[in-house]
């Protein structure tokens, strides 16, 4: 499912216009992104939670040349499915 299909599904299920569904989806994703940027955790009970974790610097290998390269440390977003979502997908 892509963003347009998700907007269509939200509009249909919530009986909203596609424009309102798009605004709602963008508000949700924007609020989640702001919260994660601050380092907070975002949790939707039954669906899942997102958190930010640090990935340490490491040494990698260039597959074309075989040369070692340094990969910088960075922050990554992690998602853990909630119990209800995991049960639904099972």
Image (cartoon, helix red, strand yellow):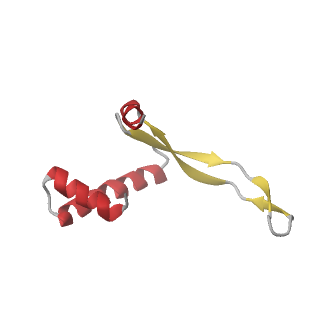
Closest to the observer, 87 or 21:
87
The image quarter in which residue 29 lies: bottom left
Say which quadrant the N terminus sits in. bottom left
Residue, x 64% and y 55% (percent of image)? Answer: 74
Closest to the observer, 82 or 37:
82
Residue reaching furthest to the front? 90
Q: Residue 31, relative to residue 51: is it above or below?
A: below
Say which quadrant the C terminus sits in. top left
Closest to the observer, 41 or 63:
63
- Please count the marks in the image: 0
Q: Position of residue 12 (x, y in %)?
A: 17, 55
Residue, x 86% and y 64% (percent of image)? Answer: 66
Q: Position of residue 39 (x, y in %)?
A: 49, 47
Q: Is residue 34 left or right of residue 15?
A: right
Does the rendering let one see residue 41? no
Q: Is residue 15 left or right of residue 59?
A: left
Q: Position of residue 9 (x, y in %)?
A: 24, 55
Residue, x 79% and y 64% (percent of image)? Answer: 63
Residue reaching furthest to the left? 15
Does the rendering let one see residue 88? yes
Residue, x 69% and y 54% (percent of image)? Answer: 73
Q: Position of residue 51 (x, y in %)?
A: 49, 43
Q: Residue 21, relative to residue 13: is it above or below?
A: below
């Amino acid at each position: 499912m892509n963003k347009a299909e998700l907007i269509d599904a939200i509009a249909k299920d919530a009986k909203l216009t596609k424009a309102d569904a798009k605004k709602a989806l963008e508000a949700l994703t924007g609020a989640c992104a702001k919260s994660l940027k601050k380092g907070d955790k975002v949790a939707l009970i039954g669906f899942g939670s997102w958190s930010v974790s640090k990935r340490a610097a490491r040494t990698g290998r260039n597959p074309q040349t075989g040369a070692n390269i340094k990969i910088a440390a960075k922050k990554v977003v992690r998602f853990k499915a909630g119990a209800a979502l995991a049960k639904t997908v099972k």
